Structures are given as C-alpha cells and as structure tokens.
Image (cartoon, rainbow, N blue to C red):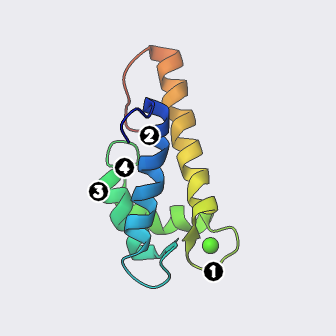
C-alpha cells in the first residue's frame, strides 16, 4: 500500500474487512447473519449504536432476500454511514458520532 492515497487505503480497507468477515463461514464472498453481526460489533462500534439490531438491519440491506449480504448490498450500508458522517460534520463540524 506504500504510496497509496488516504482514500485508496480507506476503500481497500473496507473491501478487505468485508472479505475477511465473509470468509469465516459459508460462501466466501457473502456475509451471513453471524458474520455481519461480528463485523458490525468489531468494526463499526461507533457508527451503529445497537449491535443487537443487526438482524433487522441485515434484512433491510438484503435486497435479493437470500439471507446473505453480497458486497453490493453491504456497500449500501457503507454509503449510508458515510452520508451520516458527512451530515454530522456539515452540521456540527465535529468528529464522528454514534448515529
Ligand atoms: Ca443478499
């Protein structure tokens, strides 16, 4: 990653985290319910307030209703979280807060 920009590193990190958690059980490129819950708990503790509500969150992201999240479905969440961070920064000029 030497020489990569902050943005390139951030995007790569998101992809690598997705693949790391998705590879733990079942299909290697999709998140199961358990994998998604673990990812939220470990990687998004300041952005998603209630890790116990991940089942409902997963349901809302699982567009094709196969009970797994492919990267395209997971990316909707990343987009939403990024949007929330941007809105909070714009309104308060503060650092990242819990949503
Ligand atoms: Ca799915």
Crowd around label 1: few <14 · some 14–19 · many ≥20 (10 Å): few
Left or right? Give the position of 8 relative to 49.
right
Ligand 1 neighbours mark 1 (CB distance < 8 Å): yes
Left or right? Give the position of 52 relative to 56.
left
The alpha-carbon separation of the residues under discs 2 and 4 comes to: 14 Å
**Disc nearer the start of the sequence (3/2):** 2
Q: Quadrant of residue 46?
A: top left
Residue 33 rendering spot, x and y as whole percentages: 45, 74
Q: Nearer the viewer, mark 3 or mark 2?
A: 2
Where does label 2 land, which residue?
10
Give residue 25's mark. none
**Disc nearer the start of the sequence (3/1):** 3
Crowd around label 4: few <14 · some 14–19 · many ≥20 (10 Å): some
Question: Which image quarter is the C terminus in?
Answer: top left
Where does label 3 land, which residue?
42
Q: Secondary structure at mark 4?
A: loop
Q: Quadrant of residue 22?
A: bottom left
The alpha-carbon separation of the residues under discs 1 and 2 comes to: 28 Å
Crowd around label 3: few <14 · some 14–19 · many ≥20 (10 Å): few
The alpha-carbon separation of the residues under discs 3 and 2 comes to: 17 Å
Q: Nearer the viewer, mark 2 or mark 4?
A: 2
Q: Is residue 62 above or below residue 40?
A: below
Where does label 1 land, which residue?
66
Left or right? Give the position of 91 relative to 94.
right
Which one is nearer the viewer's eye here, 21 or 86? 21
Residue at x-position 53% and y-position 17%:
90
Residue at x-position 37% and y-position 38%:
98
Q: Pick out the residue farthest to the left.
A: 42
Residue at x-position 44% and y-position 65%:
19
Give residue 44's mark. 4
């Amino acid at each position: 990653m030497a020489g990569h920009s902050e943005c390139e590193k951030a995007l790569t990190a998101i992809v690598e985290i997705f693949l790391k958690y998705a590879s733990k059980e079942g299909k290697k490129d999709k998140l199961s319910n358990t994998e998604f819950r673990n990812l939220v708990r470990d990687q998004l503790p300041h952005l998603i307030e209630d890790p116990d509500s991940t089942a409902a969150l997963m349901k809302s992201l699982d567009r094709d209703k196969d009970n797994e999240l492919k990267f395209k479905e997971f990316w909707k969440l990343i987009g939403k979280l990024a949007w929330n961070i941007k809105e909070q920064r714009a309104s308060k000029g503060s650092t990242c807060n819990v949503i």
